[in-house]
Amino acid sequence: MTVLITGGAGYIGSHCGVAFLEAGYDIVVIDNLSNSSDVSLQRIEAITGQKVPCEIADIRDQSKLEEILVKHKCSAVVHFAGLKAVGESTKMPLAYYENNVVGTHRLLSAMANTGVKQMIFSSSATVYGEPQFLPLTEDHPTSAVNPYGRTKLMIEEMLGDVAASDPAWRFGILRYFNPVGAHLSGQIGENPLGVPNNLMPFITQVADGRREQLSVFGNDYDTRDGTGIRDYIHVTDLVEGHLRAHEVLASGSAPSNCFAVNLGTGNGYSVLEMVRAFERASNKEIRYAFAPRRDGDVAECYANTELAEKVLDWKADRDLDAMCRDTWNWVCKNPRGYETSAD
Ligand code: NAD
Ligand code: WQD
């Protein structure tokens, strides 16, 4: 059974490739390398000892998708490909709608034309907007406050409509909280191009001396230390959740033919708690200064994990120290990401 992984050269997709190969599935990757390097594919091969067939192509190319689905006899898709930077999405909304929404439409059309009717989709906790209550359950009202978030909501709705049109479709929508960490081997990890938007990659670049200090966006939130609280989840736990979702969909034991579950730990940590955990893991000082709140940020965001536990029989179990340790191991082994390696 071959699983097509879109965006499989990227951060989460590369870890997913390892998890699926190690679980005994054949995979094929499609990626246009717009935010990744094909070195990650060589690393997946080094970790697993298996070949990773890869098509360097764009998911908006529907005929190419159909060719790949048929050629590799795919039976399911795990769909990571898309653009993901919130700030950039406000400056280039059309690129986001084109890549994410049009791209997913083409992918679904290609799947329909080739009879492949199972997909796991990378959604985000961003679809909950400003939390009205915590922890966030899957029935929390959805709303989006930026174009990136709106693409995720539109895709969720598109999947719901397609599922309702034909019971043969099977969709698992996974709403990620804040994925961090790296593979235990330190061979694959997050490789942001340019100035990182997210907290963990920024902290790593302060730790390794590439950046002077971290700006902590807001210390006047109504939280235990005034800084923002998030539900950080180890990428290895996250991709194990995908494996379970795939198994649940393939075995027909899903609660419906289109379900959405949170992938988080249920624990919230503040920015300062993350800084301290990273200092412990790296033995480096993380210099920081308080800065104004960042537009669009919420004070607190963490998952209710009960539905994922029930539906997927899955629970994240790696703690914040493991997330920081594995991130630091990856950065030390690859000081410039995939461009250079310390080995
Ligand atoms: P990433 O940028 O590392 O991976 C995405 C991959 O998709 C990249 O390799 C990129 O080159 C590829 N890609 C982009 N557009 C493409 C296209 N049109 N055709 C083919 N390939 C294309 O990002 P990631 O962190 O691994 O995220 C994967 C998915 O998870 C994304 O859909 C993202 O929105 C979602 N997500 C990520 C986070 C997070 O914090 N990392 C949180 C919630 C949801
Ligand atoms: C975490 C905390 C910041 C950077 C984003 C997207 C979301 C999802 C995950 C894709 C917040 C603070 C950050 C910095 C800081 N992505 N921070 N200084 O904002 O929860 O979520 O990534 O779907 O859609 O919005 O993650 O890592 O950017 O921020 O103080 O330099 O760290 O204010 O409290 P966020 P993040």
Image: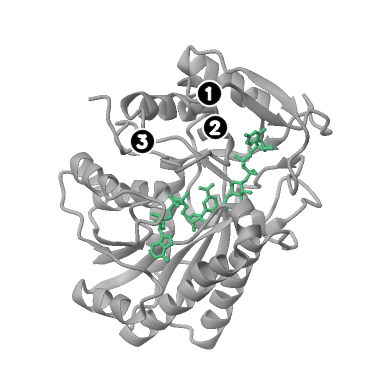
- Queried on whether the Cβ of the residue with tag 2 lies below 8 angstroms from ligand 2, the answer reads yes
- In this rendering, position of residue 276 left or right of residue 109: right
Residue 222, position in %: x, y? 84, 33
- Label 1: element kind: helix
> Against 189, is 342 above or below?
above
- Label 2: element kind: helix
**Residue carrying label 3:** 337
Name the image quarter holding the C terminus. Answer: top left
Q: Mark 2, residues whose alpha carbon is within 10 Å: few (<14), some, or many (≥20)?
A: some
Q: Residue drawn 60% across and 26% down? A: 274
**Residue carrying label 1:** 206
Check contact, mark 2 vs mark 1: CB within 8 A. Answer: yes
> Against 293, is 288 above or below?
above
> Against 200, is 210 above or below?
above
Q: Which residue is at the front of the view, 343 or 52?
A: 343
Q: Residue drawn 54% across and 75% down? A: 159
Q: Mark 3, residues whose alpha carbon is within 10 Å: few (<14), some, or many (≥20)?
A: many
Q: Which residue is at the front of the view, 41 or 20?
A: 41
Q: Amino acid at mark 3?
A: Gly
Q: Say the numbered circle drawn on residue 202.
A: 2
Residue 272 showing in the rendered view:
yes
